[in-house]
Image (cartoon, helix red, strand yellow):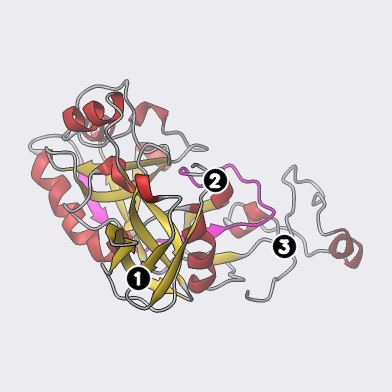
Amino acid sequence: MSPIAFGKCLPALNGLHDGPQATPAEMRNQRSLQPGCACPIYWRMPIAHLSQRAVLRLSGSEVRSFLQGQITNDIAQLAPDAPLYAGLLTPQGKALFAFILFAAAEGAILLDCDAAQAPALARRLAMFRLRRDVAIAQTELSVFAGWGETRAETADARLAAAGARWIAASADTTATLADWHAHRIPLGLPEGDEIGSDELLWLETNGRELHGVSFSKGCYVGQENTARMHHRGKVRKALVGARISGSAADAIVHAGAREAGHLRGSPHDGLQMLLIRTEFMEHALSGETGPITIVRPPWI
């Protein structure tokens, strides 16, 4: 784990104010309140710049109604202190893009998405925009995550245990991207090529367990199959973290002689996301290079 820095409260790291430096007594206590600030200081919070993410900005008078008809979640739940996890699907309910939405100034919405997919996501949204008053632009903003002893208004929309997540031009960092992967994979938080595009059904990517779908909102692309799978209990796969010994992307995982799933994405210091058939969750698993152990996320 990277060294932990002291000296600012979370709002200061978000650029909301310049907090005073910590005193030695405050450092010893590890947690205090800054003078004139009602925000708790969490001295031991790793903060990482998520350089594999990009930020799109959507604005215009019809941006919310436009997104409501496209994404899996209910845009009415999006607020400045409540980000929203959602996906954009095929008509069959397969995930094309996964992202986190943040409410921004002047009614704009920021999309925290995989950087490699950002241009394609912008084109996809523009294709369905038609004549609506919606502008789509890529920004130079960055995504940051903080975890450990954290409490923040901009909590990760998917899982409380993930910690805080926010968008800013810059922030002081005390952890690396590798630290972030070591934190998120055991929590069952997939991203990028672990989800892929037009490969997995949204509910197979933990979209339901990670609060990325509404079953009460109006229609969106892919809703019919997604709702049917949920109500009939037909979700048979999940993306979970796994401890591995060596790996190859999409390597087959076995439970004895039976195929139990596939490794997804890239390995990160002995951890990798695994698409597992849920009937094999309790079985002994092995891959091409040795045994594989599931790391059970808190939502199972």
Tell me the residue that label 2 is attached to.
Answer: 298
User: Residue, x 77% and y 61% (percent of image)?
Assistant: 20
Residue 67, picture quadrant: top left
In percent of width and height, residue 12 lies at 64, 57
Q: Tell me the number on the disc at residue 169.
A: none
The answer to which of 66 and 227 lies nearer the viewer is 227
In percent of width and height, residue 72 lies at 28, 35
In percent of width and height, residue 26 lies at 87, 60
Q: Establish if 227 lies above or below 46.
A: above
Amino acid marked by disc 3: Arg
Q: Earlier in the sequence, mark 3 or mark 2?
A: 3
Amino acid marked by disc 2: Pro
Q: Is residue 123 left or right of residue 18?
A: left
Q: Establish if 90 lies above or below 231.
A: below
Q: Indicate the secondary structure of the residue bearing disc 2.
A: loop
* Front of the two marks 3 and 2: 2
Residue 136 is covered by the magenta coloring: yes
Q: Which residues are magenta?
A: 135-158
Asked if marks 3 and 1 touch (Cβ < 8 Å), the reply is no
Q: Tell me the number on the disc at residue 44.
A: 3
Tell me the residue that label 1 is attached to.
Answer: 287
Mark 3: few, some, or many residues within 10 Å (few <14, many ≥20)?
some
